[in-house]
Structure formats: C-alpha cells, structure tokens
Amino acid sequence: MIHTKANTSIPPSGEILSLLTSLCATSNHDAHTRALALKDTTLSSSPISYSQTCLQFGRVLACTSHNLLPMRDVQIWSDSDGGVAVGTLQKDPIAGWAQLREMSGLLLKNALANAPVDGNTKMRMRLLPDASLEIKGVLCQCIADEMPGVRRVSSSIIASCTVGNEPVGMEPLPLSEWGQNILTPHLVNCLEAAILVMEGNAAASSNNVQWALLGSLQTLTKVLEDDADKFEQGSGAAFTKIVPCLLKLLQTCGEERVKVDCLQCCVHMIQVMPGSLVAQMNDFLGVLSALASDASISIRKYVCRSIVTLLSRRPEYLHDHMAPISQFILTATGDVEEEVGLEACEFWLVFASLDETMCTPEMMDVVQSLLPQLLPTLVKAMVYSEEKKGDLLEQNETDAKIGEDRAQDVAPVFHRSKAKGGGNDEEEEDEDGNYDEDKEWTLRTCAAASLDSLSSGFPPECTLPHLLPVLQECLEHTDEWVREAGILALGAIGDGCGTQMTAHMSQLHPYLMSQVTTPNNLPQLVIISCWTLGRFSSWAVEQSASGTQPDLLRAMIEAISGRILDNHRKVQIASCSALATIAEHAEDMIIPYLDPIYRVLVCALERHHTKALLVTLEIFGSLGEIVGAATGEGNLPSIYIPPLLTLWKTKAKENPMDRTLLPLMESLSYITTSIGMSVQPWALEIFETSMATINAAIMILSATDYTDEEADPLVCAADTLDGLVEGLGSNFAELVMSSTQYGSHFLTVLVALVGYDVDSVRMSAFALMGDIARQCPQVIQHGMGELISEAVCCIDPTYPSVCNNAVWALGEVFVRCEGNAAALQPYANEVVQLLISLIMGHGFNEENGPLHGLEENASTAMGRLAKVNAQFVAADLPRFLNAWFGGCSKISDQGERRDAFEGLLLAIQANPQSIKSASPDIADTVTSFLFALVSWHIPPDNISPSVLNGNYAFVAFPVGNDDLQYKFGVFLHQLKSIVGVEEWNIVEKKFPVNVRRLLREQYNL
C-alpha cells in the first residue's frame, strides 16, 4: 500500500485518478470506452462540472509525488481496478507518476482548448473564476517542476490557452486576466532569479532555480512563436524586461540549451521588434557576434537565423554592420555542419529579395565585394552531401524498378479551376524553380535559389567573371556528383544571365545533350541536365528559328524524348517536364515533331506510374493549349485520344475517384477545346465517360461526409464536357441527343452540378452552363428557370470565383433571351439589385478586394439584361450609373464590351433623367461617361496617364463597330443638350487636352 504524507496544496481526488487510469488502459476496451464517455460527460454536463474536472486534471499535474495523496483517495483509486494501477506504480513510482501527470496535463490542455458547448448558452464552456485562478497558479508552479515532461506540457498549455487562434479576450486563459499581474511577471522573475545566481549575487539552495529557468524559457519560446504581438499587448510593463534578461543570459550562462532557447526567443521578438529590443540592438548584435564561433551547432544555427530574420524584417538595423555580418554569414554558409550552412545561406536569398526601399546601395556594394568568394561557395554547397549521395544511390535502384510510386513520394494532385469572363484561372505550381528532384529545402536547394536570385539582382558583368571559371571546373570534373552540381548552377543562372550565356551555349548545349543521352549515366546527371536544357530552351528555339542550327530543336526533342521511356521514374518525370518547357518556348515550331512526340507519350502511358504518369498526362493538355488546332490535324488525334480514353475507362472502372484521372480529364478538356471538330470521332465516348464519372462520383460522395477536394472528379468531368462544348460549338446539341445512355438526363445532371454544395463544382458547372447558352442554348432551354434560379442564388461575392462564373453564365443566358423578356421577368428585379451591388463594389472582402473580372462581368450582364428590356434596369439607373460607366470601361473582350455599352445606352434612353440624378454634380456624370468613351480609343500599347495630356495617341474606334460609335455620337450631343451649353463649356474646360481633341475630331463636339 502507498503511504502518504502531508502537503499544503490540494491533492487530486481518487475519482480523477481512477478516470485517468481507465483512459490509459487501452488494452481493456470496455473500461477505456466507459472512461472516455465519463470524461466527455463530466466536461460537458455543466460549467460547474467542467470547471471541477479541469481543476482535478490541474491538481494531478501539480502533485509532485504519489506520496502526497490522502489514504482515502488512494483507496478509491485502488478499488476502481482491483489495485492494478497502484501496484504497477509501486514498481516504478517516479516515472509512472510523471507519466500520469503528463497525461493529465494533456487532458487539461484539450479540455481548455476544445471546450464543449454549453447546452444552455450554446457557447463554449469557460472556467469559473475560482477554478481559473487555481489553474493559473498550477501552471506557473509546474513550469518550474523537476520533471521535464511536466514543464513541457505546462508551457504548452499556457501558449495554446493564452495566445491561441481565438480573438483577443476569448482565449481559455486570456492574457487580459493574468498577463500583466501574474504570468509575465512570474516568467521574468524566473529569468532574473537565475541571472542573480549566475552572477554570484544569490545562492542556489536547490535545482529549483534551474528548472524554473528552463520552464520559463520554454514557455516564452512557445508564446512568442505562436503570437508575439498578442503576448506583448497582454503582458504590460513586465514585457520590457524580457529582452534584457535574454541578453544577460546569453552573456553569462554556459549551458547550451539555455542559450538556444534565448536565441529562439530573440528570433520571435524580431518579428514584432519591441522597443526594448530596439533600445538594446547594439548589445544584441554584440551578443550574436560573440556567439558566432560557438562550438555548439544549435547556437551557431540560431545566430544565423537571428541575423536572417533581422535582414528580412528590419534590415535598417544591419546597415552599419553589413560588412562584418556578411563576412560572417559567408563563412557560415560553408560551415561543415549543413544545418548551420542552410541557416546562413538563407541570408543571401533574403538579401536578393529585398526591394530598393530596404536595400541600400551601400549594402549592395558590400555583397558585390564578396561575390568572388560567395559564388564559388554557393556552387560548392550544391554538391550533394556524402550521406545524401548514399541515399540517392540506394534510391536509384528502387526508382529503376517499374512499378507504382511509394505513397510518400507522390504529391497531392489538384485541378486548375476554370474562371470565366475577366476572371483568372488558378495558377499551377511553378515548376521552374525546382532545384531538387525531391523538392526538399536543403542547403543545396537554398544555394541554388540564392544563386538564381543573385544572378538576377546583380548585372552579369558582376557575377559571370567569378562564376564561369567555377562552372568550367565543375563541368570538367571527374566526379559525376560535382558535374551534377555544376549543371545545377548553370541552370540556376539561366534567367539572370541567359542573354550573356548565349556566347557559351554553342559549347554548353552539346555538353548538356550528351549528359542526357549517354547510356548508364548517373540518373541525377540526366535529371538535372533535362532541367537545365529546359531553362535554356529559348536559346535552342532561337537557333533553329534563325537557321543558325536548323536541326537543333529536333535533336533536343529526340534527346529528351529518348529519356521519357527510361526505367528510372525520376528521369521519366524530369524528361517529361523538360519536354513541356521546350514546347512552351517552341510553340508552333514543335508541330513537325508532334507525331513522334505523341507516339512516345502514348508508350509512356503504359510504362509510367503514379507521379510520372501524372506529369505525362499533363503534357497532352499542355500541347493542346500551346499548339492549338494543329494537334488535331491529320491522324494525330487517332494516335493519342484512343489510348487516353482507354486509360480513363480502365482506371475509372477500378476507382472512379482515382486522382490520376484529374490531369487526364483536364488534358482532354484542353484537347477538345483546341482541336474543335477533329474530336468528333471520339466525342460521344468522351461525353459518356464524363457523364459516367459524374454519376459515379455523385453516388459515392452521397454515401459519405466528403471534403471539397474529394469532389474534384466532378469538377474535372464538368470541365471536360465544357471542352466538348467549346470544341464542337452548336454541334454539342446533336452530341447530347445522340447519347442513348445519358442524353435524356444531361440537363438534370447540369442542374444538380450548379446547385452542388462544393464551390469548385459550382464554378465549373456555371462555366459549362454559360458556354452551352452561348453555343447551343436549346440544350438547356427546358431547364432555364432552374438554372437561372441557381445562378441568382450564387451571386454572392463571399464566394468570388463561383459568383464570377454565375454572373458570366447569366450574361450569356441574357443574350439568348433578347426578344423574349417574359422569360426573365420573374428574376429581373433581384438580378438587377445583386448586379448593382457588384458593380459598386459592395460586399467584397476588404483585405483581398473583388476578384479580378467580377465588376466587368457584372457590367456586361447588366448591359445584356438591358438589351433584353431596358425597363428592367432603367428605374435604378441613378444609383449606379457612374459606377457602371467605370465597369464598362474595364471590359477587355470586344463582344462583351459592346453588349455592355449598348445596354447602357438603352437604359439611359429609357430613363434620361438619370443623367441629372446620378450625382449631385452633373459634371461627375459627364466626366465618368467621357472617360468610359475614351477607353474605346486608348491604344493597347499605351495605357499610361500620358495618353491624356502627352503626345496625341488616341486611335480610331474599333473596326466593325461603326453603328456603336454613331450611337455614342448621338448620345454625346443629347448629353450636351441635357447638361446645357453653359454648364457643358465649364465641364469641357476641365477635360485633358487630348480628350477635347478626340471629341472634336471623332464626334464633332
């Protein structure tokens, strides 16, 4: 039996110990399940029960020994499981009790951070005042505990519950309640007590001071990392004492872990740059200098990180010390310990990213003076470490075996959303900056990125004299790993020094080609050579185009294509990526080589797996997007479309939700759009496979709770259908009718997609709806009401991408309703009010602003609605007329622009008084209209303000729009009449001189 002794603190109850034991006993499933239910019940039944349970968890955490437990509670605990837990504890009392305390702390943290909802108030439970006060005391006590695990969990509770993600004041333990008077003063006292002992001004009677120092630093590190700004605001005057304490500890303490924690705190302090750090900046820099040569790897690493953080956040504090700091960082970049080198190397990357306001000419001069030593250091850092070489050689054997990739080697697959009208498609990841096949952020990749940035930031004449000898030495080296690093360095300077390197490319390009084509070459050499050839592919294209080396493009394509069928999966990926880059630069020049390219890619469909297959599938779409209709000429489609369809159906049969299908469907979407009617022999099969994918995905998703990402097959299948619409045009209607399996309920599926509860699905569905309305409106005629209703519901700028496509789709529907205003009558008023809000910029996220193109699409849709019936718009015209002028002037597509302005003029004709009531000052309305009119005459290559007052550069009204220009002329004279000659003359004098000339010469005004 466990004996107890008296204790001044309140010990935990036997009941809570019994609960903890049952929660630990996962092997006893029934007892564990009952314990979980009991825990949840006691935490959620009432605020009193919640507070008491949290308090009991805290008392277990604070109880330093099982010997402090009252006999009564020990007996309750023992009786709960027949003495098993108590007996086990007796075998290893110190470690066993510490483990129980840590578990109790974790349960307390979870109970506070994820408090249950009070059934009465419908709000998160909060601690009652007495319980909250005791728990705060427990946490302050426990960060000074002897047990490291207890200190760790206590500091974690403090950080998560004081500066977590909740708004200020809503945290479980808000700083406003104890930051100024309890927590931060206590942390500072722990630091100051340790400093007194270290300076010999106080005696250390026990280890308590040391434990308190470690726990307080651990706590400070976590709270500052989570939210330094919030911690500063909630800490009061005590916060100003933290930096002096940290600097004093860095100067006096000899213990590595203390110095590392202090440096970590300083790094986080730099993020907010408190006045106390600014005041002691010179002392801080002096401390960093003193620690720069410390024997500890961790200390040197955090010294570098401190300097890099200062450079990125507040470079002005480094101006006067740039020379010695840069010299230190240069030395550290070549540190024998790679983790130190990586931290130091970040300095050069950050430096190269500073804008002109942050980087002074003096700083540039300092770094430029170091380039002769720095650039070779960076190239040397690009050579794989011995450990990494061994790993890669071992991995080469695995990668050369044909088969599926390991799950950990495959990045998630995402689709590219399709924005309509003036909106932007979501950008794909930029593959151009991948300096490492595994995409790890290492010293090697950081050095390559730094060289890339520095070669762009400094003129080539400052970098190449120091780089070329190093590159030549690397490329001629007998060690293939050094040659690989040299080729990486060559590729890294492709952007910054590409033009100047043309003088050397006649020698370098054949060298790179030989590295790709040499049999049994080190795979990493082949991989990096493919990437570097891609970086300099514009040179090869220019050589072929100019006739200097007319056969060079063909030779490069053959060399790269020859590696696509390599056994090594990363060589497959690198060669496919290089081919896509070459195609992007070659454009139409690649057309003569499409046949052999497609034949190789089709073979790759059977040979490649997982990641390599994904990259291969993307190339089919890229070629369609880049080359266009030429990919559909002759027998080319018969080479690649049937194998793609076979792969699609095969994989979909195994798993319709297979994410490999996403790039396949996206590629087919680009292909069908590009080759137009050439897709007709396979159009029905593509249509029915898309529909089958949609039906299967809807059925599978309906049976489970799904994430937005899991609905991506619906998005891509809808995009593939949209590609058919864009490619076949009006013939899509005939295609739908020809499908006996899906033709009759295509419209039902479309209605389901536009109303789906995932944003990306609705976005693609509205793109499909709009294109059908534009190309073959008869397909959706019988479902027009439902489709319009769903689109109207989605005119919500909270979801800008969906809103954008819904507005664009409605605009296309309105075009088809000209002469049939009755069809829009039920929706017109609501649509007008929603479009007014978009045109005037209401409801947008203030931080991000409106989605590009949304205002333009709304202005177009309003114009098209007015063309159906101007009365729909006329009554509300004074509210938004001037904003509508502005929105119309931003539309880039000529057809949409014309519709918008024609509708606008019709609306004004229906309500001419709107001119006078649109603004308190009619001059504002006149000016708004005139600048909208002027937008038709601005040359596309001169959109600067100088076009208004500089040399006259306005152009004639676009060809083919004479009738619209005539309407503008008529309206201008009407406008002058409405305003009155006297007022018009006053306004006209304020027009820029070129605008007055334009009105005079083009509109006789």
Image: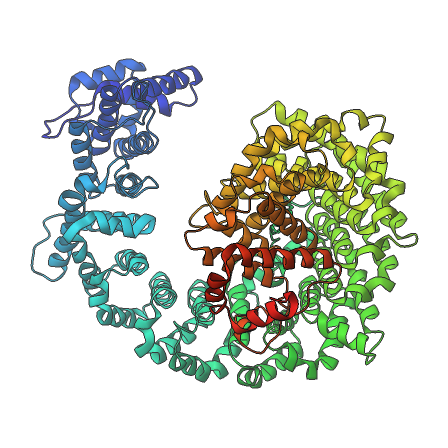
The quarter of the displayed image where residue 38 is located: top left
Q: In this view of the protein, which residue sits in the foreground, 698 or 231?
A: 698
Location of residue 589 with respect to 330 vertically, above or below: above
Q: In this view of the protein, which residue sits in the foreground, 668 or 210?
A: 668
Quarter of the figure with the C terminus? bottom right
Q: Is residue 805 left or right of residue 300?
A: right
Number of numbered discs overlaid on the protein picture: 0
User: What colouring method underlies this structural image?
Assistant: rainbow
Which residue is pictured at 52% across the width and 44% down the height?
Answer: 877
Residue 922 location (% of width, % of height): 46, 55
Q: Is residue 202 left or right of residue 89?
A: left
Location of residue 192 with respect to 148 vertically, above or below: below
The quarter of the displayed image where residue 684 is located: top right
Residue 91 location (% of width, % of height): 29, 28
Which residue is pictured at 44% across the width and 67% down the height?
Answer: 350
Q: Is residue 348 left or right of residue 243?
A: right
Residue 503 location (% of width, % of height): 69, 84
Q: In this view of the protein, which residue sits in the foreground, 774 or 492?
A: 774
Which residue is pictured at 46% across the width and 57% down the height?
Answer: 924
Location of residue 929 with respect to 739 vertically, above or below: below
Residue 74 location (% of width, % of height): 21, 19
Residue 410 in sight from this viewpoint: no
Q: In this view of the protein, which residue sits in the foreground, 964 or 1004?
A: 1004
Residue 5 in sight from this viewpoint: yes
Q: Is residue 191 left or right of residue 667?
A: left
Quarter of the figure with the N terminus? top left
